[in-house]
Image: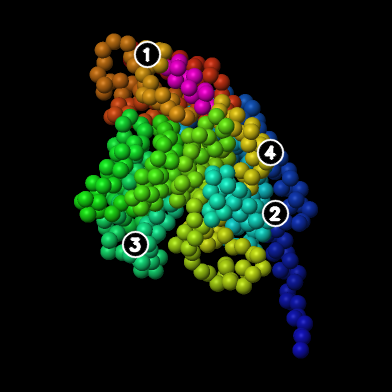
Amino acid sequence: MNQELTIYADTDNISELTQSFKKFFLNDDSESIAQYRKLTHKVADYISTQIATQKQAYSGKSPHDLINQIAEFEMFPKQGTPLESLLERTRDLVINNNISVYHPNCLAHLHCPTFVASLTAEMIISAFNQSMDSWDQAPAATMIEQAFCDELCRVYGFNDQADATFTGGGTMSNFMGLLLARDHYSQQHYNWNIQKKGLPPEASKFRILCAEFAHFTVAQSASILGLGEHAVVKIKTNEFEEEIAALEDTIIQLRAEGLIPIAYVTTAGTTDFGSVGNIGALAEVAHEHGLWFHVDAAFGGSLIFSEKHKYKLNGINQADSVTVDFHKLFYQPISCGVFLVKNKASFEYIRLHADYLNPESNESLGILDLVYKSIQTTRRFDALKPFLSLQHIGTEKFGEMIDYTIDLASTISDVIEADIQFELATRTQINAVVFRYLPKGNFSEKAIDNLNNEIKTKLLLSGKAIIGQTAVHGKAFLKFTLLNPMTEANSVIELLNEIKSLGNELLKD
Ligand SMILES: Cc1ncc(COP(=O)(O)O)c(C=O)c1O
Protein backbone atom coordinates (compact mmCIF):
# COMPACT_ATOMS: atom_id res chain seq x y z
CA MET A 1 0.00 0.00 0.00
CA ASN A 2 1.29 3.41 -0.95
CA GLN A 3 1.54 5.78 1.93
CA GLU A 4 2.34 9.45 1.35
CA LEU A 5 5.36 10.69 3.19
CA THR A 6 4.66 13.52 5.57
CA ILE A 7 6.37 16.79 4.88
CA TYR A 8 9.11 17.64 7.31
CA ALA A 9 7.54 19.87 9.94
CA ASP A 10 9.99 22.68 10.45
CA THR A 11 9.72 24.03 6.89
CA ASP A 12 10.01 27.73 7.71
CA ASN A 13 13.32 27.46 9.51
CA ILE A 14 14.69 25.09 6.93
CA SER A 15 13.74 27.38 4.03
CA GLU A 16 15.42 30.27 5.72
CA LEU A 17 18.58 28.22 6.08
CA THR A 18 18.61 26.88 2.51
CA GLN A 19 17.81 30.36 1.26
CA SER A 20 20.90 31.63 3.03
CA PHE A 21 22.97 28.99 1.19
CA LYS A 22 21.41 29.64 -2.17
CA LYS A 23 23.06 32.94 -2.90
CA PHE A 24 26.44 31.21 -2.98
CA PHE A 25 25.48 28.80 -5.73
CA LEU A 26 24.44 29.05 -9.33
CA ASN A 27 20.76 28.08 -9.26
CA ASP A 28 17.39 28.92 -10.75
CA ASP A 29 16.82 31.82 -8.42
CA SER A 30 16.59 35.06 -10.40
CA GLU A 31 19.05 36.71 -8.01
CA SER A 32 21.60 33.96 -8.54
CA ILE A 33 21.21 34.17 -12.31
CA ALA A 34 21.57 37.96 -12.25
CA GLN A 35 24.65 37.74 -10.02
CA TYR A 36 26.24 35.09 -12.27
CA ARG A 37 25.63 37.25 -15.36
CA LYS A 38 26.92 40.39 -13.70
CA LEU A 39 30.03 38.83 -12.20
CA THR A 40 31.05 36.83 -15.25
CA HIS A 41 30.78 40.06 -17.25
CA LYS A 42 32.87 41.82 -14.64
CA VAL A 43 35.55 39.12 -14.72
CA ALA A 44 35.53 39.11 -18.53
CA ASP A 45 36.00 42.86 -18.32
CA TYR A 46 38.97 42.59 -15.96
CA ILE A 47 40.58 39.95 -18.15
CA SER A 48 40.05 41.88 -21.38
CA THR A 49 41.30 45.14 -19.88
CA GLN A 50 44.43 43.41 -18.61
CA ILE A 51 45.11 41.75 -21.95
CA ALA A 52 44.41 44.93 -23.89
CA THR A 53 46.69 47.07 -21.75
CA GLN A 54 49.44 44.69 -20.60
CA LYS A 55 52.65 46.08 -22.06
CA GLN A 56 55.01 43.50 -20.65
CA ALA A 57 54.94 39.71 -20.49
CA TYR A 58 54.93 39.96 -16.68
CA SER A 59 54.43 42.69 -14.10
CA GLY A 60 57.93 42.00 -12.79
CA LYS A 61 56.81 41.41 -9.18
CA SER A 62 59.37 39.50 -7.16
CA PRO A 63 58.44 36.42 -5.08
CA HIS A 64 58.76 38.66 -2.02
CA ASP A 65 56.32 41.27 -3.40
CA LEU A 66 53.83 38.53 -4.15
CA ILE A 67 54.07 37.00 -0.68
CA ASN A 68 53.40 40.41 0.84
CA GLN A 69 50.35 40.90 -1.35
CA ILE A 70 49.00 37.44 -0.51
CA ALA A 71 49.53 38.13 3.21
CA GLU A 72 46.84 40.81 2.95
CA PHE A 73 44.31 37.98 2.64
CA GLU A 74 43.24 36.09 5.73
CA MET A 75 43.52 32.58 4.32
CA PHE A 76 40.50 31.00 6.05
CA PRO A 77 38.26 33.87 7.21
CA LYS A 78 35.38 32.98 9.51
CA GLN A 79 33.06 35.44 7.81
CA GLY A 80 32.89 35.82 4.05
CA THR A 81 33.44 38.91 1.89
CA PRO A 82 31.19 40.23 -0.90
CA LEU A 83 32.33 38.79 -4.20
CA GLU A 84 32.55 42.09 -6.05
CA SER A 85 35.20 43.58 -3.78
CA LEU A 86 36.93 40.21 -3.55
CA LEU A 87 37.16 40.06 -7.32
CA GLU A 88 38.74 43.48 -7.36
CA ARG A 89 41.43 42.29 -4.95
CA THR A 90 41.83 39.11 -6.99
CA ARG A 91 42.36 41.22 -10.09
CA ASP A 92 45.14 43.12 -8.34
CA LEU A 93 46.79 39.96 -7.06
CA VAL A 94 46.19 37.43 -9.80
CA ILE A 95 45.03 38.94 -13.07
CA ASN A 96 47.59 41.74 -12.99
CA ASN A 97 50.45 39.41 -12.12
CA ASN A 98 49.92 36.68 -14.66
CA ILE A 99 52.53 35.67 -17.14
CA SER A 100 50.75 36.72 -20.32
CA VAL A 101 50.65 33.79 -22.71
CA TYR A 102 49.32 36.24 -25.31
CA HIS A 103 52.41 38.45 -25.20
CA PRO A 104 55.00 37.87 -27.94
CA ASN A 105 57.79 37.85 -25.34
CA CYS A 106 56.32 34.86 -23.51
CA LEU A 107 58.36 32.16 -25.18
CA ALA A 108 60.04 30.04 -22.55
CA HIS A 109 57.95 26.91 -22.46
CA LEU A 110 55.35 24.92 -24.30
CA HIS A 111 52.92 27.39 -22.76
CA CYS A 112 50.44 28.59 -25.32
CA PRO A 113 47.98 31.39 -25.94
CA THR A 114 44.44 30.03 -25.99
CA PHE A 115 41.64 30.17 -28.52
CA VAL A 116 38.59 32.26 -27.69
CA ALA A 117 36.44 29.23 -28.60
CA SER A 118 38.16 27.12 -25.97
CA LEU A 119 37.70 29.84 -23.35
CA THR A 120 33.97 29.82 -24.00
CA ALA A 121 34.12 26.03 -23.70
CA GLU A 122 35.82 26.44 -20.30
CA MET A 123 32.83 28.47 -19.10
CA ILE A 124 30.44 25.73 -20.10
CA ILE A 125 32.67 23.02 -18.63
CA SER A 126 32.96 24.66 -15.24
CA ALA A 127 29.37 25.91 -14.99
CA PHE A 128 27.81 22.53 -15.73
CA ASN A 129 30.50 20.53 -13.95
CA GLN A 130 29.93 17.27 -15.80
CA SER A 131 32.07 14.38 -14.65
CA MET A 132 33.34 12.02 -17.29
CA ASP A 133 33.51 8.90 -15.15
CA SER A 134 29.91 7.87 -15.70
CA TRP A 135 27.19 8.57 -18.24
CA ASP A 136 24.72 9.60 -15.55
CA GLN A 137 27.05 12.48 -14.68
CA ALA A 138 27.73 13.54 -18.26
CA PRO A 139 25.43 12.12 -20.96
CA ALA A 140 26.08 14.49 -23.89
CA ALA A 141 29.65 15.09 -22.74
CA THR A 142 30.38 11.35 -22.72
CA MET A 143 29.07 10.90 -26.24
CA ILE A 144 30.97 13.95 -27.53
CA GLU A 145 34.24 12.85 -25.91
CA GLN A 146 33.90 9.33 -27.31
CA ALA A 147 33.03 10.58 -30.82
CA PHE A 148 35.95 13.02 -30.71
CA CYS A 149 38.34 10.29 -29.54
CA ASP A 150 37.12 7.88 -32.25
CA GLU A 151 37.69 10.46 -34.96
CA LEU A 152 41.04 11.49 -33.50
CA CYS A 153 42.22 7.88 -33.76
CA ARG A 154 41.27 7.95 -37.47
CA VAL A 155 43.14 11.26 -37.92
CA TYR A 156 46.32 9.62 -36.61
CA GLY A 157 45.78 6.70 -38.98
CA PHE A 158 44.52 4.05 -36.56
CA ASN A 159 41.70 1.66 -37.37
CA ASP A 160 38.57 1.05 -35.31
CA GLN A 161 40.43 -1.16 -32.87
CA ALA A 162 42.01 1.99 -31.47
CA ASP A 163 40.60 4.18 -28.73
CA ALA A 164 41.59 7.21 -26.71
CA THR A 165 40.90 8.94 -23.44
CA PHE A 166 41.39 12.50 -22.24
CA THR A 167 44.09 13.06 -19.63
CA GLY A 168 45.51 15.89 -17.58
CA GLY A 169 48.43 16.20 -20.00
CA GLY A 170 51.62 14.61 -21.26
CA THR A 171 52.76 13.38 -17.87
CA MET A 172 49.65 11.30 -17.36
CA SER A 173 49.53 10.11 -20.98
CA ASN A 174 53.15 8.95 -20.90
CA PHE A 175 52.49 7.22 -17.60
CA MET A 176 49.48 5.42 -19.08
CA GLY A 177 51.52 4.32 -22.10
CA LEU A 178 54.20 2.77 -19.92
CA LEU A 179 51.68 1.31 -17.50
CA LEU A 180 49.97 -0.54 -20.36
CA ALA A 181 53.36 -1.51 -21.81
CA ARG A 182 54.46 -3.05 -18.51
CA ASP A 183 51.19 -4.89 -17.91
CA HIS A 184 50.95 -6.09 -21.50
CA TYR A 185 54.48 -7.50 -21.41
CA SER A 186 53.80 -9.38 -18.17
CA GLN A 187 50.53 -10.76 -19.43
CA GLN A 188 51.93 -11.84 -22.79
CA HIS A 189 55.23 -13.29 -21.62
CA TYR A 190 54.51 -14.61 -18.12
CA ASN A 191 50.73 -14.89 -18.11
CA TRP A 192 51.01 -12.62 -15.10
CA ASN A 193 48.31 -10.12 -14.22
CA ILE A 194 50.03 -7.20 -12.50
CA GLN A 195 46.73 -5.59 -11.57
CA LYS A 196 45.90 -8.64 -9.43
CA LYS A 197 49.30 -9.94 -8.38
CA GLY A 198 51.67 -6.99 -8.33
CA LEU A 199 54.98 -7.07 -10.16
CA PRO A 200 56.29 -10.40 -11.49
CA PRO A 201 59.70 -11.64 -10.30
CA GLU A 202 61.21 -10.69 -13.69
CA ALA A 203 60.19 -7.02 -13.29
CA SER A 204 63.53 -6.05 -11.77
CA LYS A 205 65.03 -6.78 -15.20
CA PHE A 206 62.47 -4.80 -17.19
CA ARG A 207 64.00 -1.97 -19.18
CA ILE A 208 62.33 1.00 -20.89
CA LEU A 209 64.37 2.51 -23.69
CA CYS A 210 64.28 6.06 -24.93
CA ALA A 211 66.60 8.61 -26.44
CA GLU A 212 68.69 10.95 -24.36
CA PHE A 213 66.33 13.85 -24.90
CA ALA A 214 63.10 12.05 -23.99
CA HIS A 215 60.96 13.90 -21.47
CA PHE A 216 61.75 13.30 -17.79
CA THR A 217 58.30 11.78 -17.31
CA VAL A 218 59.60 8.55 -18.85
CA ALA A 219 61.89 8.13 -15.83
CA GLN A 220 59.18 9.41 -13.50
CA SER A 221 56.74 6.83 -14.87
CA ALA A 222 59.27 4.01 -14.44
CA SER A 223 59.73 5.04 -10.86
CA ILE A 224 55.99 5.19 -10.10
CA LEU A 225 55.46 1.89 -11.90
CA GLY A 226 57.77 0.20 -9.41
CA LEU A 227 60.48 -0.44 -11.98
CA GLY A 228 62.80 2.25 -10.67
CA GLU A 229 64.42 5.01 -12.66
CA HIS A 230 67.32 2.66 -13.31
CA ALA A 231 64.96 0.73 -15.59
CA VAL A 232 65.18 3.58 -18.09
CA VAL A 233 68.01 3.15 -20.58
CA LYS A 234 68.77 6.41 -22.35
CA ILE A 235 70.26 5.91 -25.76
CA LYS A 236 72.87 8.48 -26.70
CA THR A 237 71.92 10.27 -29.88
CA ASN A 238 74.04 11.71 -32.60
CA GLU A 239 73.31 15.38 -32.02
CA PHE A 240 69.59 15.62 -31.24
CA GLU A 241 67.97 12.91 -33.32
CA GLU A 242 67.13 9.33 -32.53
CA GLU A 243 69.02 6.66 -34.37
CA ILE A 244 67.65 3.40 -35.52
CA ALA A 245 70.95 1.52 -35.34
CA ALA A 246 71.60 2.70 -31.78
CA LEU A 247 68.18 1.42 -30.72
CA GLU A 248 68.78 -1.98 -32.24
CA ASP A 249 72.28 -2.26 -30.75
CA THR A 250 70.99 -1.31 -27.31
CA ILE A 251 68.21 -3.89 -27.39
CA ILE A 252 70.69 -6.62 -28.39
CA GLN A 253 73.18 -5.55 -25.75
CA LEU A 254 70.59 -5.44 -22.96
CA ARG A 255 69.34 -8.91 -23.89
CA ALA A 256 72.92 -10.19 -23.83
CA GLU A 257 73.21 -8.84 -20.28
CA GLY A 258 70.11 -10.84 -19.28
CA LEU A 259 67.91 -7.75 -19.08
CA ILE A 260 64.40 -7.47 -20.56
CA PRO A 261 63.65 -4.48 -22.79
CA ILE A 262 59.87 -4.04 -22.75
CA ALA A 263 59.21 -0.68 -24.37
CA TYR A 264 60.67 2.08 -26.49
CA VAL A 265 59.51 5.68 -26.17
CA THR A 266 60.16 7.97 -29.09
CA THR A 267 59.48 11.70 -28.88
CA ALA A 268 57.73 13.52 -31.70
CA GLY A 269 58.92 16.99 -30.79
CA THR A 270 61.48 16.89 -27.98
CA THR A 271 60.88 19.54 -25.34
CA ASP A 272 64.12 21.42 -25.94
CA PHE A 273 64.99 20.82 -29.57
CA GLY A 274 61.68 19.97 -31.18
CA SER A 275 63.25 16.96 -32.86
CA VAL A 276 61.20 14.21 -34.39
CA GLY A 277 62.81 10.89 -35.24
CA ASN A 278 61.91 8.55 -38.07
CA ILE A 279 58.85 7.15 -36.30
CA GLY A 280 58.07 4.44 -38.84
CA ALA A 281 61.61 3.03 -38.84
CA LEU A 282 61.85 3.15 -35.04
CA ALA A 283 58.48 1.36 -34.79
CA GLU A 284 59.74 -1.39 -37.04
CA VAL A 285 62.81 -2.05 -34.90
CA ALA A 286 60.87 -1.88 -31.64
CA HIS A 287 58.24 -4.32 -32.90
CA GLU A 288 60.75 -6.67 -34.45
CA HIS A 289 62.17 -7.08 -30.96
CA GLY A 290 58.76 -7.37 -29.29
CA LEU A 291 58.83 -3.95 -27.57
CA TRP A 292 55.80 -1.76 -26.90
CA PHE A 293 56.24 1.37 -29.02
CA HIS A 294 55.04 4.59 -27.41
CA VAL A 295 55.15 7.93 -29.24
CA ASP A 296 55.31 10.98 -27.00
CA ALA A 297 53.79 13.53 -29.38
CA ALA A 298 52.86 15.92 -26.57
CA PHE A 299 54.54 18.74 -28.49
CA GLY A 300 54.49 17.59 -32.12
CA GLY A 301 51.04 15.93 -32.26
CA SER A 302 49.42 18.95 -33.89
CA LEU A 303 51.59 18.56 -37.01
CA ILE A 304 49.00 16.03 -38.13
CA PHE A 305 46.84 18.95 -39.30
CA SER A 306 49.67 20.62 -41.22
CA GLU A 307 49.78 19.69 -44.90
CA LYS A 308 53.40 20.82 -44.95
CA HIS A 309 54.71 19.05 -41.85
CA LYS A 310 52.48 16.08 -41.20
CA TYR A 311 54.94 13.81 -43.00
CA LYS A 312 57.14 14.18 -39.88
CA LEU A 313 54.59 12.02 -38.07
CA ASN A 314 54.66 9.27 -40.70
CA GLY A 315 54.52 5.92 -38.95
CA ILE A 316 52.68 7.22 -35.88
CA ASN A 317 49.91 4.75 -36.69
CA GLN A 318 52.43 1.97 -35.97
CA ALA A 319 52.54 3.04 -32.34
CA ASP A 320 51.02 0.94 -29.59
CA SER A 321 50.20 4.14 -27.76
CA VAL A 322 50.50 7.87 -28.31
CA THR A 323 50.58 10.98 -26.13
CA VAL A 324 49.11 14.17 -27.59
CA ASP A 325 48.72 17.39 -25.64
CA PHE A 326 46.07 19.89 -26.54
CA HIS A 327 47.41 22.42 -24.05
CA LYS A 328 50.59 22.87 -26.05
CA LEU A 329 50.58 23.34 -29.83
CA PHE A 330 46.77 22.98 -30.00
CA TYR A 331 46.24 26.23 -28.06
CA GLN A 332 43.90 24.88 -25.40
CA PRO A 333 43.68 26.08 -21.80
CA ILE A 334 45.38 23.81 -19.28
CA SER A 335 44.61 20.95 -18.67
CA CYS A 336 43.90 19.14 -21.87
CA GLY A 337 45.71 16.04 -23.05
CA VAL A 338 44.81 12.80 -24.73
CA PHE A 339 46.14 9.26 -24.70
CA LEU A 340 45.59 7.02 -27.71
CA VAL A 341 46.00 3.28 -27.80
CA LYS A 342 46.18 1.14 -30.91
CA ASN A 343 44.33 -1.78 -29.38
CA LYS A 344 41.45 -0.70 -27.18
CA ALA A 345 41.54 -4.06 -25.40
CA SER A 346 44.68 -2.76 -23.67
CA PHE A 347 42.45 -0.61 -21.48
CA GLU A 348 41.45 -3.90 -19.79
CA TYR A 349 44.76 -3.73 -17.90
CA ILE A 350 43.44 -0.78 -15.92
CA ARG A 351 39.74 -1.64 -15.80
CA LEU A 352 38.36 -1.84 -12.31
CA HIS A 353 34.74 -2.36 -11.42
CA ALA A 354 32.84 -0.12 -9.04
CA ASP A 355 29.18 -0.99 -8.55
CA TYR A 356 28.27 2.64 -8.10
CA LEU A 357 29.84 3.76 -11.38
CA ASN A 358 29.48 1.12 -14.03
CA PRO A 359 26.78 -1.44 -13.39
CA GLU A 360 26.88 -4.05 -16.18
CA SER A 361 23.15 -3.51 -16.98
CA ASN A 362 23.96 -0.11 -18.48
CA GLU A 363 25.88 -1.53 -21.41
CA SER A 364 22.83 -3.05 -23.10
CA LEU A 365 21.23 0.43 -23.24
CA GLY A 366 24.21 1.90 -25.04
CA ILE A 367 25.15 3.80 -21.91
CA LEU A 368 28.87 4.37 -21.80
CA ASP A 369 30.79 4.88 -18.56
CA LEU A 370 34.21 6.15 -19.54
CA VAL A 371 35.79 5.48 -16.16
CA TYR A 372 37.22 2.15 -17.36
CA LYS A 373 39.60 3.91 -19.76
CA SER A 374 41.10 6.32 -17.28
CA ILE A 375 43.33 6.29 -14.24
CA GLN A 376 41.27 9.23 -12.98
CA THR A 377 37.77 8.81 -11.64
CA THR A 378 36.20 12.28 -11.53
CA ARG A 379 37.35 13.95 -14.72
CA ARG A 380 36.64 17.24 -16.49
CA PHE A 381 34.88 17.51 -19.85
CA ASP A 382 38.05 18.90 -21.42
CA ALA A 383 37.16 17.38 -24.79
CA LEU A 384 34.73 20.24 -25.34
CA LYS A 385 37.67 22.64 -25.75
CA PRO A 386 39.40 21.13 -28.80
CA PHE A 387 35.99 20.05 -30.13
CA LEU A 388 34.63 23.62 -30.15
CA SER A 389 37.95 25.11 -31.29
CA LEU A 390 38.38 22.87 -34.30
CA GLN A 391 34.71 23.25 -35.23
CA HIS A 392 35.17 27.02 -35.13
CA ILE A 393 38.58 27.34 -36.80
CA GLY A 394 38.62 24.37 -39.13
CA THR A 395 41.65 22.14 -39.57
CA GLU A 396 42.85 24.05 -42.64
CA LYS A 397 43.29 27.38 -40.84
CA PHE A 398 44.66 25.54 -37.82
CA GLY A 399 47.27 23.87 -40.05
CA GLU A 400 48.26 27.30 -41.41
CA MET A 401 48.94 28.45 -37.85
CA ILE A 402 51.25 25.50 -37.23
CA ASP A 403 53.07 26.12 -40.52
CA TYR A 404 53.47 29.79 -39.70
CA THR A 405 55.04 29.12 -36.29
CA ILE A 406 57.49 26.59 -37.74
CA ASP A 407 58.46 29.07 -40.46
CA LEU A 408 58.90 31.73 -37.79
CA ALA A 409 61.29 29.48 -35.84
CA SER A 410 63.26 28.88 -39.02
CA THR A 411 63.48 32.63 -39.81
CA ILE A 412 64.68 33.39 -36.28
CA SER A 413 67.26 30.58 -36.53
CA ASP A 414 68.57 32.26 -39.71
CA VAL A 415 68.87 35.61 -37.92
CA ILE A 416 70.73 34.02 -35.00
CA GLU A 417 73.05 32.03 -37.24
CA ALA A 418 74.04 35.20 -39.09
CA ASP A 419 74.98 37.09 -35.92
CA ILE A 420 78.44 36.55 -34.41
CA GLN A 421 77.15 37.52 -30.97
CA PHE A 422 74.97 34.42 -30.93
CA GLU A 423 75.52 30.71 -31.30
CA LEU A 424 72.68 28.51 -32.55
CA ALA A 425 72.74 25.03 -30.95
CA THR A 426 71.10 23.33 -33.91
CA ARG A 427 68.48 23.95 -36.56
CA THR A 428 65.39 22.39 -35.05
CA GLN A 429 62.61 20.65 -36.94
CA ILE A 430 59.73 22.49 -35.35
CA ASN A 431 59.14 25.45 -33.04
CA ALA A 432 62.19 25.56 -30.78
CA VAL A 433 65.17 27.87 -31.19
CA VAL A 434 68.08 27.08 -28.87
CA PHE A 435 70.97 29.54 -28.79
CA ARG A 436 73.32 31.43 -26.52
CA TYR A 437 74.70 34.92 -26.30
CA LEU A 438 78.42 35.11 -27.02
CA PRO A 439 80.26 38.09 -25.60
CA LYS A 440 82.97 39.69 -27.70
CA GLY A 441 86.46 38.92 -26.39
CA ASN A 442 87.93 36.02 -24.45
CA PHE A 443 85.72 34.56 -21.78
CA SER A 444 85.71 31.21 -20.04
CA GLU A 445 82.82 28.82 -20.71
CA LYS A 446 81.79 29.32 -17.09
CA ALA A 447 81.61 33.10 -17.57
CA ILE A 448 79.50 32.67 -20.72
CA ASP A 449 77.19 30.28 -18.83
CA ASN A 450 76.76 32.80 -16.02
CA LEU A 451 76.08 35.59 -18.45
CA ASN A 452 73.35 33.66 -20.25
CA ASN A 453 71.77 32.61 -16.96
CA GLU A 454 71.79 36.20 -15.79
CA ILE A 455 70.23 37.46 -19.01
CA LYS A 456 67.37 35.02 -18.60
CA THR A 457 66.74 35.95 -14.96
CA LYS A 458 66.97 39.69 -15.58
CA LEU A 459 64.43 39.49 -18.37
CA LEU A 460 62.05 37.48 -16.16
CA LEU A 461 62.32 39.69 -13.11
CA SER A 462 61.97 42.88 -15.11
CA GLY A 463 58.89 41.35 -16.70
CA LYS A 464 60.19 42.11 -20.20
CA ALA A 465 60.41 38.56 -21.46
CA ILE A 466 59.99 35.00 -20.32
CA ILE A 467 62.59 33.00 -22.20
CA GLY A 468 63.70 29.42 -21.74
CA GLN A 469 66.98 27.98 -20.63
CA THR A 470 68.54 24.60 -21.13
CA ALA A 471 71.90 22.86 -21.29
CA VAL A 472 73.60 21.72 -24.48
CA HIS A 473 76.66 19.51 -23.99
CA GLY A 474 76.94 20.93 -20.48
CA LYS A 475 76.78 24.60 -21.57
CA ALA A 476 74.01 27.04 -20.66
CA PHE A 477 71.80 27.91 -23.61
CA LEU A 478 68.72 30.09 -24.01
CA LYS A 479 65.57 28.94 -25.72
CA PHE A 480 62.65 30.47 -27.59
CA THR A 481 59.64 28.21 -27.95
CA LEU A 482 57.81 29.93 -30.78
CA LEU A 483 54.27 28.62 -30.42
CA ASN A 484 52.36 31.85 -30.76
CA PRO A 485 50.99 32.27 -34.30
CA MET A 486 50.31 35.97 -33.61
CA THR A 487 54.01 36.71 -33.04
CA GLU A 488 55.89 38.41 -35.85
CA ALA A 489 59.59 37.98 -36.59
CA ASN A 490 60.31 41.67 -35.89
CA SER A 491 59.24 41.44 -32.27
CA VAL A 492 61.49 38.41 -31.74
CA ILE A 493 64.38 40.25 -33.41
CA GLU A 494 63.75 43.18 -31.07
CA LEU A 495 64.06 40.79 -28.15
CA LEU A 496 67.31 39.39 -29.56
CA ASN A 497 68.65 42.96 -29.67
CA GLU A 498 67.53 43.43 -26.07
CA ILE A 499 69.43 40.26 -25.12
CA LYS A 500 72.56 41.60 -26.80
CA SER A 501 72.31 44.98 -25.03
CA LEU A 502 71.67 43.26 -21.72
CA GLY A 503 74.67 40.97 -22.28
CA ASN A 504 76.91 43.93 -23.12
CA GLU A 505 75.63 45.86 -20.08
CA LEU A 506 76.18 42.94 -17.72
CA LEU A 507 79.75 42.68 -18.92
CA LYS A 508 80.36 46.25 -17.81
CA ASP A 509 79.14 45.54 -14.22
C1 LIG B 1 57.70 15.97 -24.96
C2 LIG B 1 56.92 16.17 -23.70
N1 LIG B 1 56.29 15.13 -23.13
C3 LIG B 1 55.59 15.24 -22.00
C4 LIG B 1 55.48 16.45 -21.36
C5 LIG B 1 54.69 16.57 -20.09
O1 LIG B 1 53.48 17.16 -20.40
P1 LIG B 1 52.56 17.88 -19.31
O2 LIG B 1 53.35 19.03 -18.80
O3 LIG B 1 51.36 18.26 -20.08
O4 LIG B 1 52.24 16.89 -18.25
C6 LIG B 1 56.11 17.57 -21.91
C7 LIG B 1 56.03 18.87 -21.25
O5 LIG B 1 56.57 19.85 -21.65
C8 LIG B 1 56.84 17.43 -23.11
O6 LIG B 1 57.48 18.46 -23.68
Q: Earlier in the sequence, mark 1 or mark 2?
A: 2
Residue at the (31%, 42%) spot, across then down: 247
Tell me the tag on residue 421.
1
Per the rendering, the mark at residue 26 is: 2
Work out whether 97 lies above or below 156: above
Depth check: 460 or 65 in front?
460
Q: Position of residue 437 (x, y in %)?
A: 37, 18
Residue that lies at the very extreme toward the top in this rendered image: 441
Q: Could you say whether the residue bearing mark 3 is in a helix, strand or loop?
A: helix
Residue type, mark 2 in image? Leu
Amino acid at pointer 4? His
Judged from the image, the secondary structure of the residue bearing numbered disc 1 is: loop
Residue 22: x %, y % from top left: 70, 58
Residue annotated with mark 4: 392
The secondary structure type at the circle numbered 4 is helix
Q: Give the answer, above or below, for where 426 lies relative to 394.
A: above
Looking at the rendered image, the disc whose residue lies closer to the viewer, 4 or 3, is 3
**Of discs 2 and 4, which sits in the foreground?**
4
Could you give the CA–CA distance between mark 2 and mark 4, rounded to whole angstroms? Answer: 28 Å
